[in-house]
Image (cartoon, helix red, strand yellow):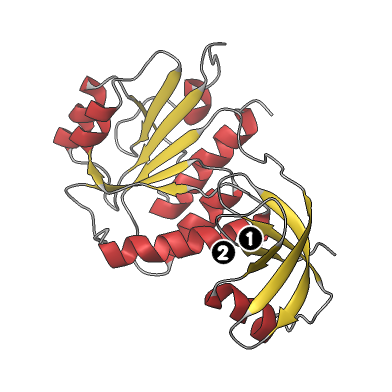
Amino acid sequence: MAAPRFFHSPLPLVGDVTLCEAEARHASNVLRLSVGAQVVLFDGLGGEASGTIATVHKRSVTVQLTARTDSDRELVQPLELVVALPKGDRQKTLVDGLVQLGVTRLTPLVCQRGVAQPSAAALERLERSVVESSKQCGRNRLMCISPPQTIAQVTQASAEPLSTLSLFAHPYGAATSISEATTDLRSQITAARMAVGPEGGFSDAETSQWLEAGWQCIELGRRILRIEIAALQMAAWWACLAKK
């Protein structure tokens, strides 16, 4: 069984580290680890180290680092998902899946039919979910949660180079499937940006914004998918296509 993982940043090369209160509670109260237990620490920036628990208290756990085990588990060709956030617990489902699939960045999208406002509190919850999901799946780099952006901001910031594939999912009127859009990926494609709209899809004006910016409109099948499922399908597709 793999050693439990805990987030600690910054992560020194050697020595003892004291886990933050939340991670200490997870180790002592939830997992009930004791002195001598083997654990893994990661810093969210690519660093990873194995260690041994040296002291355990209710709100304080100290780990003695024993070896650096830095491992890169990221997609070679990064992926950004631009998503109109779903409501409630579906946001956690979205983040958990995207982290596991290796998505590099999640940008909450502000658009006409959006139902969940990407408030500061909501973004903080998403960032906590990123840490928890990274602990589970073994990623050593945290998926970045960007500030909310409108379509205009996304497309203006992306004066996209030819090396970036830009797709947006829209269930109404799209003629190209995701498989067709990615069949002949040019050798120079090194990254992707994919957008998923709100329930009800993008408005006609918003669709025009994407197209005018050079993004390609795709559909994801004959069924209407929930926001988080559409985003996960796109991420899974790219994870399978991206170079290992």
Q: Residue at x 60, y 71 (%)?
A: 19
| Whether residue 216 is situated above or below residue 141 in the rendered picture | above
Q: Quadrant of the N terminus?
A: bottom right
Task: Give the x, y percent position of residue 84.
Answer: 31, 50
Task: Give the x, y percent position of residue 95.
Answer: 48, 56
Q: Residue at x 37, y 15 (%)?
A: 161
Task: Give the x, y percent position of residue 98.
Answer: 52, 49
Q: Answer with left or right where residue 239 lies relative to residue 157.
A: right
* Residue at which label 1 appears: 135
> Label 2's element?
helix
Q: Residues within 10 Å of mark 1 (few under 14, many from 20)?
A: many
Question: How far apart in space, not on screen, are marks 1 and 2 (Cα)?
Answer: 5 Å
Q: Is label 1 in contact with label 2 (beta carbons under 8 Å)?
A: yes
Residue 41 falls in which quadrant of the image? bottom right
Q: Say whether residue 143 is visible.
A: yes
> At label 2, which amino acid type do we have?
Glu
Q: Quadrant of the C terminus?
A: top right
Q: Say whether residue 226 is visible.
A: no
* Residue at which label 2 appears: 132
> Label 1's element?
helix
Q: Answer with left or right where residue 167 lies relative to residue 8.
A: left
| Whether residue 163 is situated above or below residue 135 in the rendered picture | above
Q: Residue at x 62, y 88 (%)?
A: 58
| Whether residue 170 is situated above or below residue 198 in the rendered picture | above
Camera-nearest residue between 174 and 74: 74
Task: Give the x, y percent position of residue 214.
Answer: 29, 19
Residue 224 is labelled as: none
